[in-house]
Amino acid sequence: MTNCYCGSGKSFEDCCQPILTGKQSASTAEALMRSRYSAYVLADINYLMNSHHPSTRPTKERKDILRWTKSVQWIKLEVKNSIAGTENDTEGWVVFIAYFSEGGKIETIHENSRFVKENGKWYYISGQHQ
Ligand SMILES: [Zn+2]
């Protein structure tokens, strides 16, 4: 049993894995956000692209994102706040801090991400740095 990369305290098999493999869809915006963090850790670029809303999907940066996420060491994710984004919502926001090490230096991404649900599926739309 591997603790999930997203820091939920659950096992990977009971947390992000079924979402990454498409067995299950993320039921909340936060679950999608967490699965995207795990996808960065695992360099799962297909999942990162598919979970990104088509209107803002960075298709051209696909290779760069893949190269970048492989070049850093992901340390941990801290979810600071979730607004809406429940099973009954179609929009949600998640504030998080992701920690990673790049070239021996600890860096963070502090972001307020926006998510929308379409046809029962959550997508990442955009993020605002905090
Ligand atoms: Zn997880």
Image (cartoon, helix red, strand yellow):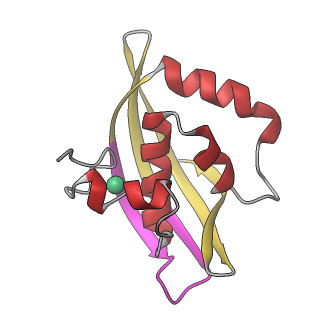
Front-most of 59 and 86?
Answer: 59
Q: Which residue sits at x=79%, y=58%? A: 54
Front-most of 117 and 79?
Answer: 117
- From the top left corner, tell me how far across and down residue 120 is, in percent: 62, 81
Q: Which residue sits at x=42%, y=45%? A: 38
- From the top left corner, tell me how far across and down residue 2 is, in percent: 21, 44
Image quarter of residue 30: bottom left
Task: Report the side of 20 relative to 117 (left or right).
Answer: left
Q: Which residue sits at x=78%, y=53%? A: 56
Q: Which residue sits at x=62%, y=51%? A: 128
Task: Report the side of 79 relative to 43 (left or right).
Answer: left
Task: Report the side of 50 relative to 14 (left or right).
Answer: right
- From the top left corner, tell me how far across and down residue 96 is, in percent: 43, 52
Front-most of 22 and 51?
Answer: 22
Location of ligand 1 given as a quarter of the image? bottom left
Q: Is residue 67 above or below residue 118?
A: above
Q: Is residue 42 above or below residue 53?
A: above
Residue numbers of the magenta segment: 77-95
- From the top left corner, tell me how far across and down residue 4 is, in percent: 28, 49
Main SS, magenta region, reads: strand
Q: Is residue 28 magenta?
A: no
Q: Is residue 80 magenta?
A: yes
